[in-house]
Amino acid sequence: MTRIAFIGLGIMGSPMAVHLARAGHDVVGFNRTPEKTAPLVAAGGRAAPSVREAVRGAEVVMTMLPDSPDVEEVLGGDDGVLAHAERGALLVDFSTIRPDVTQDLAGRARERGLAFLDAPVSGGEAGAKDAALSIMVGGEPADFAAARPLLDVVGKTVVHVGPSGSGQTVKAANQLMVAAHIQALAEATVFLEAYGVDVDAAFEVLGGGLAGSKVLTQKKANMRDRSFDPGFRLQLHHKDLGIVQAAAREAGVITPVGALVGQLVGSLVAQGHGTLDHSALLKGVEQLSGR
Ligand code: NAD
C-alpha cells in the first residue's frame, strides 16, 4: 500500500484517484472545489483541506490540473507541493502542460530532494473511467520503475519515452493528431449529412477500413446527436494546440494542420463554446458551411 496525495479531482483526476483507492492505496485528495473529493471518499479515500495537509506523509504526490500556471502554483507556490512534500517523495504530474515548465519544475523538485515524472495521459474521460489510459512518461528510468505499479492501476499502455519533458512533447504530438482527426470527422459528418447519407451506416463501414480510429469510435455519436457535454473541453484543446505551435516553432518544424485547427478551436472558444467537448468542432464546420 502506498500513501498517495492526489491533487486535482476533475473529469480525469477523480476516476484515476478512485481506481488507486480501490486498488488498496491510501489516497488523500485535494481539489480547489472541495465537493469534487466526494467520489474518492466514497471509494475509501480521504479528503484534505489543503495541499499542505494532502502531501503530509505522502510517498507519492500526483497532480491532474488544467494548465501550466495551475501546476506552477500547486507545485511551486509558497504553500505548494515543493515546499511541503516529504523529502524523497516522488511527484507524478499527469496534467498536460508546456514541456519547458515541466523541466523547470523537475529541476526545482530535484533541488529539494524530490523525484519528478511528467506523465500526461491520453484516452479521454472513458479511458480514465475504464483505467485504460495511455500514459507517456518523461523522467529518470529508476523513478519510472518506482512509479510503474501505480501507473498500471490507471493505465493500459504505459511507456517511458525519455528524459524529463519528453512525456509532454509526446502528448503535444498526440493533441495535434487528435485535433486533426476530430476536425476531419466533423467535416465528414457534415458532408455525409448534406448528401442525406445515413451517418451510422457510413461510419460503420468506414470504421472497418483505414479511416477507423478511436476518435471515430468515441466521437461519432456526439457529432450525430449534437451532444457536446465534456469530455474534453475545447478550451483545454486550445491550450494544447498553443503548446504544439510554440514547441514546433522552437524546433523549426512547420505544422500547418495544427495551426489551422488551433484557429478553428480558438474561434469556437472566442464565441463562448470553450466548455463544450472538442467534438463541438462540428459547430465550426456547420458555420463555415452555412448550415
Ligand atoms: P478539469 O477541469 O475537469 O479538472 C481539473 C481539476 O483541477 C478541477 O477539479 C479543478 O477544480 C482542480 N483545480 C484547478 N486548480 C486547482 C488548484 N490550484 N488547486 C486544486 N485543485 C485545482 O480538467 P480535466 O478534463 O480533468 O483535465 C485535467 C488535465 O488533463 C488537463 O491538463 C487536460 O488537458 C488533461 N487531459 C484531459 C483529458 C480529458 O478528456 N478531459 C484527457 C487527457 C488529458
Image: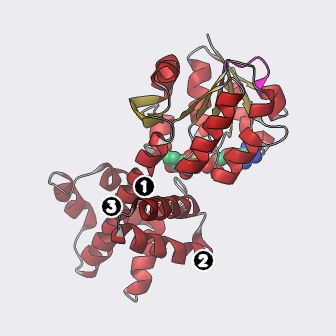
The circle drawn on residue 270 is 2
First in sequence, mark 3 or 1: give its number: 1
Residue 212 coordinates in the image, percent (x, y) = 22, 53
Residue at x 70%, y 49% (from the top left corner)? 70
Q: Secondary structure at mark 1?
A: helix
Q: Amino acid at mark 2?
A: Ala
Residue 4 at x, y percent in the picture: 67, 22
Q: Quadrant of residue 52?
A: top right
Using residue 28 as the reference point, say whether residue 184 is left or right of it.
Answer: left
Q: Which SS class for mark 3?
A: helix
Q: Is residue 66 above or below residue 267?
A: above
Mark 1 vs mark 2: in front: 1
Could you tell me the amino acid type at mark 1?
Gln
Q: Which residues are magenta?
A: 55-60
Would residue 61 be seen by someone viewing this image from the given angle?
yes
Q: Where is residue 49 shown, x and y percent of the image?
A: 85, 33
Residue 123 higher or lower than 58, as above or below: below
**Mark sitting on residue 175:** 1
Q: Is residue 47 visible?
A: no
Residue 44 position (above or below residue 82): above
Identify the residue shown where x is 41% and y is 59%. Answer: 251
Q: Which residue is mark 3?
A: 181
For label 3, the crowd category at 10 Å Cα-Cα, with few meaning under 14, some 14 to 19 and many 20 or more, is some
